[in-house]
Structures are given as structure tokens and as C-alpha cells.
């Protein structure tokens, strides 16, 4: 999954604070979040659990999807997460 555009959602825990991001290297980016190498929101609020992701063929498509998800209301985001990951398991272990 190296160097493939992806949209991801991190959470502070089950039904917790959410963060939506986009990257071209999902494994590297999540590792950076988990190790608090990304200053800002995820570091400040302890949002480190990868609960959802989707890969895209083109970065432009991933960016558009990120913008779309950020506009969604919270319940729609939760529904999306629970469709893929009903237990809110940290998907990092599957990637790394």
C-alpha cells in the first residue's frame, strides 16, 4: 500500500473524537500520527486509532473524497466507520 492515495479516519477511541485526512502513503502517515510527529489536532486530542480508510487510484479523487467526508455530519461518519469496522478496531495492525 506504499505510495497509494488514501483517505483515512482516525479516532480517539470508540465513538470518540474523529480526524479525517488524505495521504499518498497511508502506512507512513499513520505511523507519524501514532508517534505524535504530526503537530496539531491529532497530537493535541490523542486521536491515534485508524478506524477507517479507503484507497484511490488518483490523488485528486482522494482529495475530493476527503473534502466530501469533512462536510458530512457526525452520524454519517460514524455509520461509514461502523459499516467497515463495527468494533472500531485499530486497523493499523492490519497495515503495518
Image (cartoon, rainbow, N blue to C red):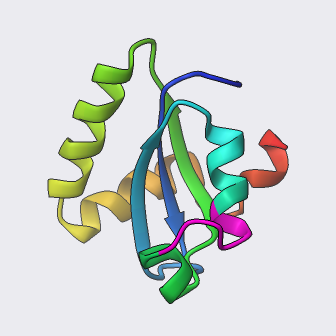
Quadrant that contains the N terminus: top right
Where 14 sits versus 92, above or below?
below
Would you say the magenta stretch is mainly helix, strand or loop? loop
Quadrant that contains the C terminus: top right
The stretch in magenta equals 33-39
Residue found at x 45% / y 12%? 57
Judged left or right of residue 19, residue 63 is: left
**Label tally:** 0
**Front-most of 68 and 40?**
40
Residue 83, percent from left and from top: 48, 49
Residue found at x 70% / y 44%? 28
Residue found at x 39% / y 57%? 20
The answer to whether residue 43 shows anywhere in this view is yes
Which residue in the rendered view is the most extreme toward the top? 57
Judged left or right of residue 21, residue 73 is: left
Residue found at x 55% / y 80%? 43
Judged left or right of residue 52, residue 27 is: right
Where 27 sits versus 46, above or below?
above
Residue 92 within the segment the image draws in magenta: no
**Front-most of 80 and 38?**
38
Residue 10, percent from left and from top: 53, 63
Where 5 sits versus 36, above or below?
above
Residue 88, percent from left and from top: 62, 65
**Front-most of 40 and 66?**
40
The answer to whether residue 87 shows anywhere in this view is no
Amino acid at each position: 500500500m506504499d505510495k497509494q492515495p488514501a483517505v483515512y479516519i482516525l479516532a480517539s477511541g470508540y465513538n470518540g473524537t474523529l480526524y479525517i485526512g488524505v495521504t499518498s502513503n497511508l502506512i507512513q502517515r499513520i505511523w507519524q500520527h501514532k508517534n505524535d510527529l504530526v503537530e496539531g489536532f491529532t497530537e493535541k486530542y490523542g486521536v491515534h486509532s485508524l478506524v477507517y480508510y479507503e484507497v484511490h487510484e488518483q490523488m485528486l479523487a482522494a482529495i475530493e473524497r476527503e473534502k466530501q467526508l469533512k462536510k458530512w455530519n457526525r452520524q454519517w461518519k460514524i455509520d461509514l466507520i461502523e459499516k467497515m469496522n463495527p468494533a472500531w478496531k485499530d486497523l493499523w495492525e492490519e497495515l503495518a
